[in-house]
Amino acid sequence: MDSIFKKTLRSELDFQDVKVKELAFKTGLSKRTLEGYLGARASIPPADVAVKIAGALNVSVEYLVTGRKFFERPVSEQDQRIIEEIGMLSKGQKELLAQFITSLKEFKIQKE
């Protein structure tokens, strides 16, 4: 059974378009160590290592361990589906989407 840590770490790496080699450099951990957290056996790192990984990815350790991001307001099911869909886009597609959202916000301001 895949661990939540493994799934969340893989998802975050994909979302940020960060390669394991890059994460290894940012954390000072070996690529092999990180691959151990992502591999078939999917071990969970000790707390100090999880802190390094979370810091390098700019996410909380709690998120990596539980898979849940904690927002100030509850996230609707529709918002959660949108967030998941965005996570599957390429880096270029995400940049286009960000530009589109900015345009939408500006359009709304002009309409009011």
Image: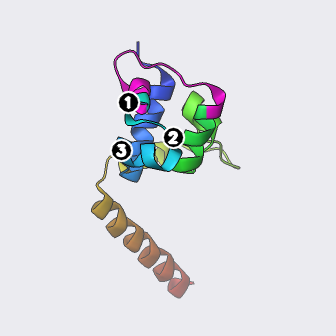
Please tell me whether mark 2 sits on a helix, a strand or a loop: helix
Q: Quadrant of the C terminus?
A: bottom right
Residue 9 left/right relative to 74: left
Q: Position of residue 30 (x, y in %)?
A: 43, 36
Crowd class of label 3 (few under 14; some 14 to 19; many from 20; radius 10 Å) = some
Farthest residue in the top direction?
A: 1
Q: Identify the mark nearer the N-term, 1 or 3.
A: 3
Q: Position of residue 110 (x, y in %)?
A: 51, 87
Label 1 amino acid?
Answer: Arg
Q: In the image, which residues are magenta?
A: 34-48
Kindly check if marks 1 and 3 are in contact, taking CB atoms under 8 A apart as contact.
no
The reply to whether residue 61 is visible in this rendering is yes
In the rendered image of this protein, does residue 57 appear above or below residue 53? below
Query: Badge 1 is on which residue?
Result: 32
**Res 66 quadrant in image:** top right
Callout count: 3
Q: Quadrant of the N terminus?
A: top left
Residue 21's disc is 3
Query: Badge 2 is on which residue?
Result: 77
**In the image, is residue 79 part of the stretch drawn in magenta?**
no
Please tell me whether mark 3 sits on a helix, a strand or a loop: helix
Q: Identify the mark nearer the N-term, 2 or 3.
A: 3
Label 2 amino acid?
Answer: Glu
What distance separates the C-alpha of mark 1 from that of mark 3?
Answer: 9 Å
In the rendered image of this protein, does residue 32 appear above or below residue 92? above
